[in-house]
Amino acid sequence: MPDIKINLKAWLKLLLFLADEIAIVAAVILLLWILDVHLHIGILIGIGAVLGTIVLLLHKMLWPVLSGGQTNHGSMVGLEGEVVSPLTPEGVVKVRGELWKAVIIEGQATQGQNVVITSLNGLKLLVRRKDPDGCFAKSQGT
């Protein structure tokens, strides 16, 4: 259900973005009707096809902006990554084939170690080391 809300919201934003163009087209059609100008049905269909194509292209180009972006940061929490440059405490990790700046919560991690994303701070990942058995590394205080 949330996808439908996001999609509807994006379409409403697009319609608001195109409101002035829609108003101009409506005014021209009204003016032609008042002046008793009759257009051939083929011309009207052609104009409709061009306008429809413009709306679809604008929707395709503006979709990432209108829907709030393509990255859902919350979905990254819990994903595993591999350390590319040592986390001492800041470095770089590779997650889903992408390189991200990361900060390790406790201790350090060397190149090649696996980490788990615990949260995000802006565009930096906050990570925790993973033991070879797949568990989180225990904090030294416990």
Image (cartoon, helix red, strand yellow):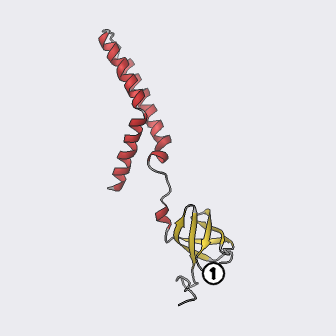
Can residue 45 be seen?
no
What residue is rendered at 32% in x and 11% in y? 38
What residue is rendered at 49% in x and 61% in y? 73
Q: Quadrant of residue 23?
A: top left
Residue 135, relative to residue 92: is it above or below?
below
Mark 1 lies on residue: 107
What residue is rendered at 56% in x and 84% in y? 137
Where residue 93 sits in the image (x, y, percent)?
63, 68
* Residue at the limit of the structure toward the bottom, as seen here: 142
Q: Quadrant of residue 2?
A: bottom left
Q: Nearer the viewer, residue 123 or 112?
A: 123
135 horizontally vs 84: left or right: left
Can residue 10 be seen?
yes
67 horizontally vs 34: left or right: right
What residue is rendered at 42% in x and 27% in y? 21
Count up the numbered dots: 1
Where residue 30 sits in the image (x, y, percent)?
32, 17
Q: Quadrant of the N terminus?
A: bottom left
133 horizontally vs 52: left or right: right
81 horizontally vs 3: left or right: right
Residue 140, relative to residue 22: is it above or below?
below
Q: Nearer the viewer, residue 98 or 30?
A: 30
Q: Secondary structure at mark 1?
A: loop
Residue 117, relative to residue 20: is it above or below?
below
Where residue 50 sits in the image (x, y, percent)?
44, 27
Dot 1: few (<14), some (14–19), or many (≥20) neighbours within 10 Å?
few
Residue 72, relative to residue 28: is it above or below?
below
Q: What amino acid is found at the position of numbered circle 1 in the picture?
A: Gly
